[in-house]
């Protein structure tokens, strides 16, 4: 463990320069031995080697991507979102299965008061969920589990299930039952633990007025989806996470959504939350499609403001403009114990000082060791004000901030 008088600022600067040619291996052991911080954390109650993961999207839809992430040291990967189907192959959300591979990385400027004028990044694409066959996804899932097992990296499936529109009362529970059961069979053939499962509320829902214009409809989804998944799982051990979306309503309604999840009881309560995917701009067009989801400073500012005003006990995984370790740390202060990223892995090469290795390794180098906005520099700067023992894990550090806030 490091000496209490160690000049950790100088050490981080030296490490940032030294590791520009390659990260230490094992990364977690080096961080613990040098800085007294354990990167060990939990996702859905399952252990992960570190809190940094890849969010579901275009960068987690084939085994080559998963293998690079595993070899580069990510803690977990959430696979591209599967569109649920019933045993006949019918998909009520088929419109979300759009094949698209083109992505555009753009600079974006914050407009919310706290970040007005702040420059950031957003990635735009018109694809939504998995566009290949259901069988191909199950094969991909199994192969990804093999890759993760060999590299101590958690693999998480993501699904978009049927959601009734306002005025509809029927829930297509056969989609829920068939899809969840098929995923469980693959998981159970590879693992003996509970299966984590993300239910994806796509950011594009915010732009579909037939789905999201009524608050009551959204709150109904949040109460009913967990119950259906739990009740149709037939005794299968599943940890359900709800990946919430930024609705086209006020920040207060975002808190109302979170409160609804927190207040749910029994099978209507999800096991953890993922907060909160991208904002939606109905006026912008991309590749002939009107309305696009976007990220950047406005996204993280809204998410952090909402989480600052939400009292919760539910486990939380954060997403939303996590392009620096400092932003990840701000989510940790609000109770998040893992961080899901997508845009970070798409930034221009000029944003990374590590020039070799995989994009994932370069992202971890930037996230952890950057002397100004890296995770280690930020968290160690806050240690004197909050305090935690050497070797504290990420959940323990998050709990220390929570205790300090209550105190």
Image (cartoon, rainbow, N blue to C red):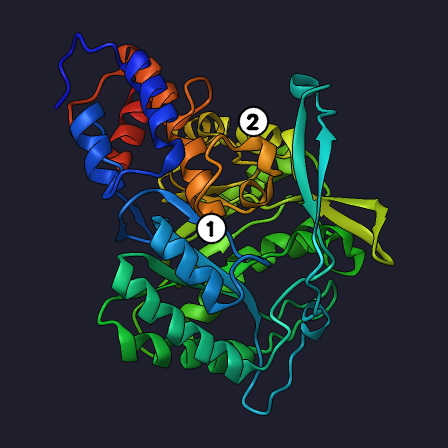
Given the current orientation, which residue lies at the most extreme bottom position? 88
Q: Residue at x 28, y 80 (%)?
A: 189
Task: Report the quarter where the N terminus lies.
Answer: top left
Residue 160 appears anywhere in the view: no
Q: Position of residue 203 (x, y in %)?
A: 66, 51
Q: Mark 1 or 2 closer to N-term?
A: 1
Tell whether 87 sits left or right of 249.
Answer: left
Asked whether the viewer can see residue 119, the reply is yes
- Check contact, mark 1 vs mark 2: CB within 8 A: no
Foreground residue among 320 and 121: 121
How packed mark 2 is, by other alpha carbons closer than 10 Å (few <14, some 14-19, many 20 or more), is some
Residue hosting label 2: 305
Instruction: Count numbered badges in the picture.
Output: 2
Q: Mark number for residue 174?
A: none
Rendering coords of residue 15 (x, y %):
32, 24
Task: Give the image quarter of residue 222.
Answer: bottom right
Q: Give the left or right position of residue 361, taking residue 250 as reference.
A: left
Q: Residues within 10 Å of mark 1 (few under 14, many from 20)?
A: many
Q: Nearer the viewer, residue 17 or 159?
A: 17
Give the Cα distance between marks 1 and 2. Answer: 23 Å
For mark 1, what is the residue?
A: 54
Q: Residue at x 45, y 39 (%)?
A: 362
Q: Quadrant of residue 82?
A: bottom right
Is the residue 147 above or below the residue 406 in the image? below
Question: Circle 2 — which element?
Answer: helix
């Amino acid at each position: 463990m490091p000496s209490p008088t160690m000049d950790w600022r100088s050490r981080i600067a030296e490490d940032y320069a030294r590791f520009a040619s390659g990260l230490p291996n094992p990364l977690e052991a080096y961080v613990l031995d040098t800085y007294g911080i354990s990167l060990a954390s939990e996702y859905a109650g399952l252990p992960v080697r570190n809190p940094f993961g890849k969010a579901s999207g275009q960068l987690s839809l084939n085994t080559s991507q998963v293998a690079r992430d595993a070899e580069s040291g990510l803690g977990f990967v959430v696979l591209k979102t599967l569109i649920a189907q019933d045993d006949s192959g019918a998909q009520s959300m088929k419109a979300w299965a759009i094949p698209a591979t083109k992505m555009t990385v753009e600079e974006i400027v914050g407009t919310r008061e706290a970040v007005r004028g702040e420059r950031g990044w957003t990635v735009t694409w018109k694809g939504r969920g998995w566009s290949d066959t259901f069988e191909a996804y199950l094969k991909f899932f199994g192969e990804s589990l093999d890759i993760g097992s060999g590299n101590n990296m958690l693999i998480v499936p993501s699904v978009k299930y049927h959601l009734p529109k306002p005025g509809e009362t029927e829930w297509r529970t056969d989609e829920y039952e068939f899809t969840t059961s098929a995923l469980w069979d693959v998981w159970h053939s590879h693992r003996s633990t509970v299966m984590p499962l993300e239910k994806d509320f796509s950011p594009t829902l915010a732009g579909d007025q037939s789905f999201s214009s009524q608050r009551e409809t959204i709150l109904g989804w949040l109460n009913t989806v967990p119950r259906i998944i739990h009740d149709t799982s037939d005794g299968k051990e599943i940890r359900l996470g709800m990946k919430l979306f930024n609705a086209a309503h006020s920040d207060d309604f975002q808190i109302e959504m979170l409160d609804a999840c927190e207040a749910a009881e029994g099978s209507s309560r999800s096991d953890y939350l993922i907060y909160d995917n991208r904002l939606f701009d109905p006026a912008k067009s991309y590749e002939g499609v009107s309305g696009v989801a976007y990220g950047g400073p406005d996204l993280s500012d809204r998410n952090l403001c909402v989480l600052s005003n939400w009292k919760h006990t539910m486990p939380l995984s954060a997403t939303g403009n996590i392009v620096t370790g400092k932003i990840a740390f701000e989510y940790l202060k609000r109770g998040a114990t893992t961080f899901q990223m997508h845009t970070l892995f798409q930034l221009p090469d000029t944003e990374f000082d590590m020039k070799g290795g995989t994009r994932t390794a370069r992202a971890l180098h930037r996230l952890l060791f950057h002397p100004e906005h890296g995770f280690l520099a930020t968290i160690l700067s806050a240690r004197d004000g909050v305090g935690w023992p050497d070797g504290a894990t990420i959940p323990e550090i998050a709990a220390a901030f929570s205790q300090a806030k209550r105190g």
